[in-house]
Image (cartoon, rainbow, N blue to C red):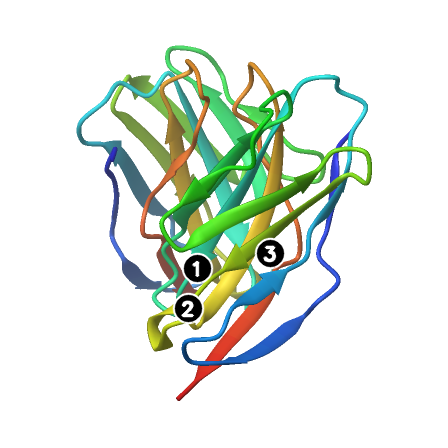
Amino acid sequence: GAVVSQHPSRVICKSGTSVKIECRSLDFQATTMFWYRQFPKKSLMLMATSNEGSKATYEQGVEKDKFLINHASLTLSTLTVTSAHPEDSSFYICSASSGGPPYEQYFGPGTRLTVT
Amino acid sequence: AQKITQTQPGMFVQEKEAVTLDCTYDTSDQSYGLFWYKQPSSGEMIFLIYQGSYDEQNATEGRYSLNFQKARKSANLVISASQLGDSAMYFCAISPSGYSTLTFGKGTMLLVSP
């Protein structure tokens, strides 16, 4: 099946700094990429949807100036958490879709962010 | 709008037995897809099985089968011959056909005991 990678898998940063998470589709072209956030023992919450070459569409309640998403190529999307605070600590998962049938999403392994 | 309901926060099953994880959905779309994902403690989301709303037969993938009852809006996952490695969180999800956006349920934690 299709492979999606995420980097880094774990990151610890200080409050007030920014951190970038990369999501790559390794063996297919991802016209659409998704970013999710997951709190412990909770379901995945969609943060935003990004299409290659266009601005991301953010879900209600997600601050677009805080969570910057860039989908510059068909194989790479990045999520930058700006001016991170401890409440931003979470598990962030990306997924990618080729945009064609069966419209399946392939998930990355996730990034655990801890803000101290 | 779409919604997934998973009413079982946790399920226990003995090794080699079958288990059914419940999923009901609500959607105004005529055409849609239903997915099941497994999330082990490592965090990775693993795709298990897909059912299209117009598929006449229930989907099967190895030990996984989807009991699709369209009139009841249910899409239960059946795992046969449970294995210890099946212990994980299981999420049911729905997407409108032609789009990739997934709406997830809250998940069911499955524990398989020896």
Q: Residue at x 25, y 23 (%)?
A: A75
Which residue is identified by label 1? B39
Quarter of the image for the C terminus of chain A: give it: bottom left
**Mark 3 → mark 1, Cα distance in angstroms:** 10 Å
Residue A89: % across, % down:
49, 62
Amino acid on which the number 3 mark rests in the picture = Ser
Q: Residue at x 42, y 32 (%)?
A: A105
Quarter of the image for the N terminus of chain A: give it: top left
Question: Which subunit holds the residue at mark 1?
Answer: B
Residue B89: % across, % down:
51, 65
Q: Quadrant of residue B60?
A: top left
Element type where label 2 sits in the image: loop
**Mark 3 → mark 2, Cα distance in angstroms:** 26 Å
Amino acid on which the number 1 mark rests in the picture = Gln
Answer few, some or many: residues within 10 Å of disc 2's Cα (few below 14, many 20 plus, some between 14 and 19).
Answer: some
Which residue is identified by label 2? B81
Disc number for residue A107: none
Answer few, some or many: residues within 10 Å of disc 3's Cα (few below 14, many 20 plus, some between 14 and 19).
Answer: some
User: Is there any visible trace of residue A45 in the rendered image?
Assistant: no
